[in-house]
Each structure stands twice: as C-alpha cells, then as structure tokens.
Amino acid sequence: MTRSLENRRILLVIGGGIAAYKSLDLIRRLRERGAQVRPLLTRGAQEFVTPLAAAALAGARAHTDLFDRADEAEIGHIKLARDADAIVVAPATASLMARMATGEASDLAATVLLATTLPILIAPAMNVRMWQHPATRRNLATLLGDGVRVVGPNDGAMAEAEFGPGRLAEPNEIAAALEAMLAGGERPGGFGFLAGRAPAGALAGRRVLVTSGPTHEPIDPVRYLANRSSGRQGHAIAAAAAAAGADVTLVSGPVSIPDPAGVRMIHVETARAMLVAVEEALPADIAVFTAAVGDWRPAEVGQNKIKKDGSEPAPLRLVENPDILATVAGRSSGRPTLVVGFAAETDDVLANALKKIARKGCDLLVANDVSASGGVMGGLENTVHLVSRDGSVETWPTLDKDEVGRRLVARFAALLPV
Ligand code: C5P
C-alpha cells in the first residue's frame, strides 16, 4: 500500500444511510494511506454507526452537533471547515446532497460544507429511485457546477431488494478518487463557468447516451482484434453531460481509464454487445457515438486457442459488424432528438466527414484527424471539426479532450429544442 495520502488532513462527513457502516472501513483505508481523518457524523449517521466507533478508528474525536458547547469553544464549525486539505462526504445521502445544493446550514455537516472553500468529494448512496429522481439529478448538477467531485454510486443490489445505481462506491474507490482530486490541486470548476461549459443544469431532465472506447472482437479465447482508442474523449463527453445535469448512460468498450462519476456505466467488449446495450439504454434525447467500433469481426471464433502447427497460418476471415450509429440514426420511432457521430479519419478529413454524415444519417459529425502524427488516438488532446448536415464546418483549436467534451456538451444543449 503506497502512503499516497501521507499527512493529508481529511474531514470525513458521514451521512445517515445504511451505507454509513462502510464509512468505518473508509476511515481505515484512508489512514492506511497515511491520511489523518477527522470524522463528523450527522444525526442520521448516528442511527447507523456510533461516534465512538468512528473516533476509535480515526484516532481522533468525532464531531456531531452544531451547538456542542465544547466543540464551539475548542474548534468551532468555521475551523472544521478550514482545518483540513479536503472534505469527503460518504455516504452522501439524498438529503445531504439537497442541503448542500441549496446551501442550507441546518446542522453541523451542512454548515461546515457551506462554510468551506476546501475541495469536496461526495460519494452518494441512496435508493435507486431517489438517485434517479429529477430533484436529485438537479442537485447533482448544481453540486458538479459548484466544483464538487463525485465518486459512484455503483450499480448493484440494494438493501431494499432493488437493483440499480445507488450503492456507495467501495472504500478503495473513494480513496482513489480522493487521491486524484488532491493530485489535481485546485478546486475543480470553481464557482464560475469555464469557457465553453454548459450552464449548470442545462441538461437537467435530459437523457444522454454516449458510446466510448474500442471494441474487442475475439479471434479465440486469448486473442482479439482491437484499435488504439483510449475512451478519453467519450468518457469526457459523458462526464461533461453529467456535469450539465443529464441522466447519462455510458456504454464503453474495454478501456484502462476510470468510469466517470455520476454516470450509469455499461461495460461491453464487442460491437454486437455494444449495439444491444445501446438499444436497451434508449430512449435518449441525445446520443453521442464516440466509440471506435471495430468495423469487422472474425467470421469464426476458435473455441480453443489456435495453435501454430508449422504449416501456413489459416487466413483470418472477417465479417462486418453492425453499424450502431447508423442503426440508431435510422430508427423510425424512438430516434434520439440529436444523434452525433464521430469520424476518425487519417486523410481527407473534411471531405470524408461530409460523405459520412449523409451515409450515417446523423445530425452532427465530429471529425478528427487520427493520423499517427496527430497522436489523437490514445492521446490527451484533440483537434475537431464540427460538421453539420447542411455542410457547414467549424474547426476548433487543439484542446484538451476534457475541454472538447465540455464544449461539445454546451453545443448539444444549445441545439436541443426547449
Ligand atoms: O464508419 P466509421 O467507423 O468511420 O464511423 C464512425 C462513427 O460511426 C463513429 O461515431 C462510431 O462510433 C460509429 N460507428 C458505430 N458502429 C460501427 C462503426 C462506427 O456506431 N460499427
């Protein structure tokens, strides 16, 4: 275990939900990474875990009430809000998120969260219907717009025998997200809008579907056909759409980057599995097909590893994969209002993009030059041309893929009819 949080002072706000018991394990995970943890329990949290247990594991006293005379004399809520490197809220209940989003200082936790300028990471956990409720989506959008970072929630079985997003992220995932936030330094997003960012809540109540990453097309149990897509651009679009308040489903091929926060993830391997996942995720208002889907797959998949036997290797016969973008864009019913395709081209980028937009039937095509010299495939930056159906072309400067994601989402939001 690397002591990646050595001497970092973390205020851990524990909200009142069944997942509160996991926050005790989180304290241990943070401490084994070297962090100093100060727990703060809401009244609800104390129904699930005791301040004594939190204090014992943290090796520090646990804070509870707003009007605790000893506390106010010794440390005070303003000091609690300042005297740390970051604040982690886990579990962040629907109620705590609502209080944070509206700036309601009704208890110690909410007061500290309102009074702080520290970076905040929340790990939501709640019933799946509560997580999907438009009110929670709006609150999430507000919090993301305010620069709050989010980890999870994960999909899974819930205490109420329901299944879906709402489970608290695992303690190790929360610790990793905290490390990433602290490594990033500044308070992400701040209170203003970054250039090109959609206004907070611009996509509240909208459903957005994004595909991302490569596909793996198996040849035999150990080999596959793939491409160099990292998933960075698609994941950045999904993250930006979530930040604008959308209900986002991200269907991703195999990538090595983390799942973006606050989106519903569906992991797939093959083009055909991606098509099934996309169709299941519809309807959507906006569908963005960023994935570098394999055009072909091996016609036969070996049941066992294909062996060298000294003779000429058998030719690899390929068959065409379904075109997911064209399938969705061509739907006669339930077509998303805005269907966006990507075109990874190595030559004649614009001429090919114009042909592609007609062939695929999408509304907008984001064309990028992925020739080896550009380093776009797998890289951190992208130079895109936005091609519309009417043939108009807009070329953007070379930008970080996250920034391209934010600008694209701002554009999509503007293109949707109100
Ligand atoms: O035809 P080409 O692969 O260049 O088209 C790229 C666009 O089509 C991208 O938006 C990609 O996600 C989508 N696509 C797809 N299914 C395929 C091939 C491409 O959705 N089988």
Image (cartoon, grey):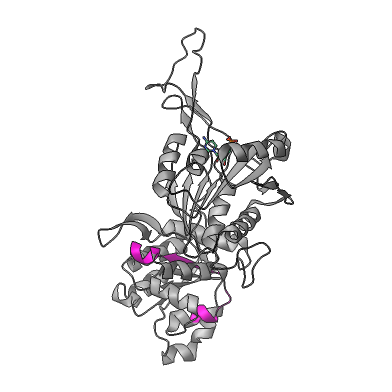
Q: How many marks?
A: 0
Q: Is residue 160 left or right of residue 411?
A: left
Q: Quadrant of the C terminus?
A: bottom right
Q: Visible in this render: residue 404?
A: yes
The quadrant holding residue 153 is bottom left
In the image, residue 123 lies in the stretch drawn in magenta? yes
Q: Residue at x 72, y 51 (%)?
A: 396
Q: Residue at x 35, y 68 (%)?
A: 20
Instruction: Residue 119: give x, y in percent of width and height.
Output: 56, 70
Q: Residue at x 46, y 43 (%)?
A: 331
- Furthest-left residue in this view: 161
The quadrant holding residue 406 is bottom right
Towards the viewer: 232 or 171: 232
Instruction: Residue 109: give x, y in percent of width and height.
Output: 44, 79
Q: Which residues are magenta?
A: 112-132
Instruction: Residue 404: give x, y in percent of width and height.
Output: 65, 53
Q: Is residue 377 above or below residue 45?
A: above
Instruction: Residue 227: give x, y in percent of width and height.
Output: 57, 34
Towards the viewer: 69 or 59: 69
The quadrant holding residue 189 is bottom right
Instruction: Specify the quarter for ligand 1.
Output: top right
Q: Is residue 163 left or right of residue 418?
A: left
Q: Visible in this render: residue 270?
A: no
Towards the viewer: 182 or 192: 192
In the image, residue 222 lies in the stretch drawn in magenta? no
Q: Is residue 50 above or below residue 105?
A: above
